[in-house]
């Protein structure tokens, strides 16, 4: 029997677009009682990017896991994107990765060289980050899936959380939006080559340098923008007390994305993200296509960072060399009673 080689032919969806409905996921977690522990500094309570376990007053472990089906047919590239995405959670928490474990689901009928290339791509990225692949786990499955469980280190006094922004702080986004829309068009063989290449460049751009630059600033809060879309992750940062006013025109967007949104190349998760944010955001007079970009699931997206508005231009300047699309995109204010988590201007 001929070995199968096409990755995308096996998977109806891929990347972070394969995530479970955020509302459904939230309902599951609410049924799981939270148990406090002095050593567990960060858990799932605020939907943060990773768990953190204290080892000493000056040292803590960062622990995260991320895997998904492929979004490209190039096996090595898929491995690189998956590893870049998995590492991002550690960087979003202010940590430094030290070790990773592979997670593999692979069809028995598929050419094993495909898996070899996926693992090689992932290992390259982990090595580039200064960490080690220390093992993993693999099973046969009807769909190929790959990702990693990543362990990092962080000083407990320098943990970056997603729920600690304050009134008046500015928000910076380091990478452009629109990856999900471009990948959807790519699956339909409708994407322009230059647009697809821009999406690949964004997904393989590590957030490591941004995390290193942030160490020189007093950051209010941080998260990485992935499957729940820009507004889903912004909602987590707003919590119950803030409204974040966003200037849509300042948001970096990948080339061609508005066209793909207007042609309805959106994903099923984007609609689930929209449903999850119903009543939580004021979209103003945005066109339906522009709205779609804000709900679009991102794979290996950028960091969303808050800090003192007076320091934001300096941080932005420092980021620009490695993240040319980075931009100041909004500011936090006090939420009025019954007000939205975000207002799009």
Image (cartoon, rainbow, N blue to C red):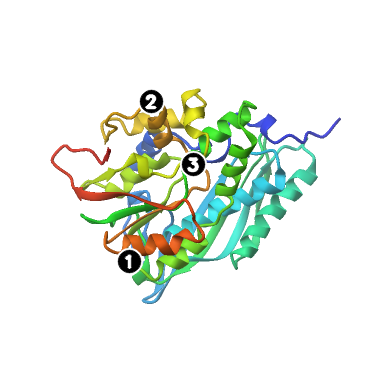
- Spatial distance from mark 1 to mark 3, Cα to Cα? 34 Å
Front-most of 213 and 34?
Answer: 213
Front-most of 75 and 156?
Answer: 75
Residue receiving disc 3 = 298
Are the residues flagged by discs 2 and 3 in contact, CB closer than 8 Å? no
What is the secondary structure assignment of the residue under circle 3?
loop
Q: Mark 2 against mark 3, which lies toward the viewer? A: 2
Q: Residue at x 66, y 35 (%)?
A: 143
- Spatial distance from mark 2 to mark 3, Cα to Cα? 18 Å
Q: Mark 1 against mark 3, which lies toward the viewer? A: 3
- The numbered mark, 1 or 3, whose residue comes first in the sequence reads 1
Mark 3 Cα shell of 10 Å, populated few (<14), some (14-19), many (≥20): many
Mark 2 Cα shell of 10 Å, populated few (<14), some (14-19), many (≥20): few
- The numbered mark, 2 or 1, whose residue comes first in the sequence reads 1
Residue receiving disc 2 = 288
Residue 52 horizontal side relative to residue 30, left or right? right
Q: With respect to residue 319, does 277 lie above or below? A: above
Location of the C terminus by quadrant is: top left
Residue 246 horizontal side relative to residue 300, left or right? left
- Spatial distance from mark 2 to mark 1, Cα to Cα? 46 Å
Q: Is residue 63 visible?
A: yes
In x, y percent, where is residue 226? 46, 44
Residue receiving disc 1 = 38
Marking on residue 52: none
Are the residues flagged by discs 2 and 1 in contact, CB closer than 8 Å? no
In x, y percent, where is residue 317? 41, 62
């Amino acid at each position: 029997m001929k070995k199968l080689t096409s990755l995308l032919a096996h998977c109806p969806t891929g990347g972070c677009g394969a995530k479970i409905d955020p509302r459904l996921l939230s309902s599951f977690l609410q049924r799981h009682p939270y148990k406090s522990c002095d050593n567990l500094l960060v858990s799932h309570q605020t939907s943060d990017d990773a768990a953190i376990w204290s080892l000493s007053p000056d040292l803590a472990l960062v622990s995260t896991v991320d895997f998904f089906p492929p979004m490209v047919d190039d096996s090595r590239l898929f491995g690189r994107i998956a590893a870049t995405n998995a590492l991002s959670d550690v960087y979003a928490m202010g940590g430094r990765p030290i070790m990773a474990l592979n997670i593999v689901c692979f069809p028995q009928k598929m050419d094993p060289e495909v898996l070899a290339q996926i693992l090689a791509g992932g290992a390259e990225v982990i090595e580039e980050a200064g960490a080690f692949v220390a093992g993993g786990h693999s099973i046969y499955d009807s769909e190929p899936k790959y990702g990693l469980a990543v362990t990092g280190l962080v000083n407990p006094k320098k943990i970056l959380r997603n729920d600690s922004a304050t009134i008046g702080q500015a928000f910076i986004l380091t990478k452009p939006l629109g990856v999900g829309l471009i990948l959807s068009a790519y699956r339909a063989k409708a994407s322009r080559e230059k647009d697809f290449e821009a999406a690949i460049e964004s997904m393989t751009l590590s957030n490591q340098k941004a995390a290193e630059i942030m160490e020189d600033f007093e950051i209010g809060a941080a998260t990485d923008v992935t499957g729940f879309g820009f507004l889903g992750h912004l909602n987590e940062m707003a919590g119950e007390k803030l409204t974040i006013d966003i200037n849509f025109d300042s948001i970096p967007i990948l080339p061609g994305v508005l066209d793909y949104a207007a042609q309805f190349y959106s994903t099923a998760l984007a609609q689930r993200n929209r449903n999850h944010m119903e009543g939580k955001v004021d979209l103003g007079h945005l066109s339906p296509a522009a709205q779609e970009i804000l709900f679009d699931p991102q794979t290996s997206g950028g960091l969303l960072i808050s800090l003192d508005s007076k320091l934001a231009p300096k941080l932005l300047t420092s980021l620009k060399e490695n993240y040319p699309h980075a931009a100041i995109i909004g500011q936090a204010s006090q939420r009025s009673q019954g007000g939205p988590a975000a207002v799009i201007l």
